[in-house]
Image: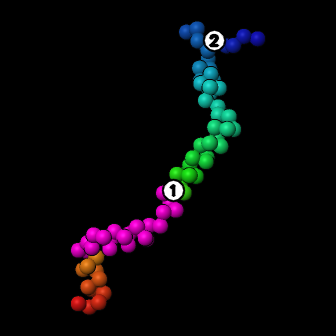
Amino acid sequence: MTKPKSPEGTSSLPGIFFFQETIMDMKKRIMIAVAILLVDSIFFFLPLTAVFLAYIIIFNPPWFRDFFNRLNGL
């Protein structure tokens, strides 16, 4: 059985060969999933409150001083 041809002489299903080349095996899928989980764990497990508190202690921004003074009624 031969493949159907288009009038230009190419296959009528040009994308089928592309899809066959891009199919991932299970090992690649597992590696991509693990990489996504690692990146997610690194960036979102970070204690953002502690980082924010360290920023306030180190730089003492004026907007935080104003907020704190309004809380104390000064």
Tell me the element at label 2. loop
Q: Position of residue 17 (x, y in %)?
A: 62, 22
Residue farthest along the right direction in this orientation: 1
Tell me the element at label 1. helix
Q: Is residue 55 above or below residue 18?
A: below
Q: Residue at x 65, y 43 (%)?
A: 30
Q: Position of residue 73 (x, y in %)?
A: 26, 91
Q: Is residue 20 above or below residue 55?
A: above
Front one among 49 and 71: 49
Q: Residue at x 76, y 11 (%)?
A: 1
Q: Which amino acid, mark 1?
A: Ile
Q: Is residue 23 above or below residue 42?
A: above
Q: Which mark is residue 42?
A: 1
In which quarter of the view is residue 55 placed? bottom left
Q: Are marks 2 and 1 in contact (CB under 8 Å)?
A: no
Say whether disc 2 or disc 1 marks the residue closer to the N-terminus: 2
Q: Position of residue 66 (x, y in %)?
A: 24, 80
Q: Please provide the residue range marked out in magenta.
A: 43-63
Magenta region includes residue 45: yes
Residue farthest along the bottom direction in this orientation: 73
Front one among 68 and 16: 68
For the C terminus, give its image quadrant.
Answer: bottom left
Instruction: Provide the residue designation for mark 2.
Output: 5
Magenta region includes residue 47: yes
User: Callout 1: few (<14), some (14-19), or many (20+) C-alpha neighbours within 10 Å?
Assistant: few
Q: Which amino acid, mark 2?
A: Lys
Q: Which mark is residue 63?
A: none
Q: Residue at x 61, y 17 (%)?
A: 12
Residue 7 visible in the snapshot = no
Q: Residue at x 32, y 72 (%)?
A: 56
Give the overall secondary structure of the magenta segment: helix
CA gap, disc 2 and disc 1: 51 Å
